[in-house]
Amino acid sequence: MHIHKYEKYWLVFGIATLVAFLVIVGVGAFHQGSHPNNGKKTLDYEKVREHEIFSNPGVHKVEGKDWDYEVVVLASAFNYEPPVIEVPLGAKVKFIATSADVMHGFEVAGTNINMMLEPGYISEYVTEVNKVGEFLIVCNEYCGTGHTMMHSMLKVVDSNESHK
Ligand code: CUA
């Protein structure tokens, strides 16, 4: 079978592009850990306020786990509970969040915290907060007329400073 020279070039180019693309996706998924919510943990969103975790949204200090704080966030049209999250600098924090109604976002501007909150699914993210400041939390999934008004705040405080 005879393959034309340009056809060969084109095949090589096509295969190289495919390989390059798979490498980029693979590095992103396996090395940088970017992947969608695995959806393993579910709950009955209509009874979310009776749920063992989500009946008590807020910042909770925990002992004997791989992280120091658990931040439980319940999103609903068009607000977040708690309205303000305050954690100390350097803390390892696990964010545990869900939605009580429709799909919402949970993006902490200026950080790499960014989760999609789906009713019936628990989204989790563990991170270390190592920048002092106030970070705006915004909803980045269109959720209705109040979508643009939906926000809260993450405050990272240096506890050594505030006690002086
Ligand atoms: Cu909630 Cu957009």
Image: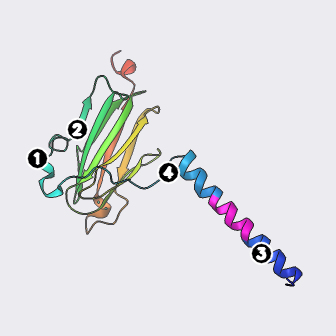
The relative height of residue 13 versus residue 81 in the rendered view (above or below) is below
* Secondary structure category for the residue under label 3: helix
Task: Name the residue: 24% across, 63% down.
Answer: 102
> Quadrant where the N terminus lies?
bottom right
Q: Position of residue 115 (x, y in %)?
A: 38, 52
- Check residue 11 in the rendering and tell me which mark sits there, or answer none: 3
* Secondary structure category for the residue under label 1: helix
Spatial separation of the CA atoms under disc 3 and disc 1: 58 Å
Spatial separation of the CA atoms under disc 1 and disc 4: 31 Å
Q: Position of residue 147 (x, y in %)?
A: 29, 63
Within-10-Å neighbours for mark 2: few <14, some 14–19, many 20+: many
The relative height of residue 160 versus residue 129 in the rendered view (above or below) is above
Marks 2, 1: nearer the viewer: 1
Q: Position of residue 116 (x, y in %)?
A: 36, 56
Q: Which residue is mark 4?
A: 34
Displayed quadrant of residue 13: bottom right
Q: Earlier in the sequence, mark 2 or mark 1?
A: 1
Image: magenta residue range: 15-22
Q: Please, what is the three-letter code of the amino acid marked with disc 3?
A: Leu
Q: Earlier in the sequence, mark 1 or mark 4?
A: 4
The reply to whether the magenta stretch includes residue 129 is no
The relative height of residue 104 versus residue 131 in the rendered view (above or below) is below
Within-10-Å neighbours for mark 3: few <14, some 14–19, many 20+: few
Q: Which residue is mark 1?
A: 50
Q: Please, what is the three-letter code of the amino acid marked with disc 1?
A: Glu
The reply to whether the magenta stretch includes residue 20 is yes
Marks 2, 3: nearer the viewer: 3
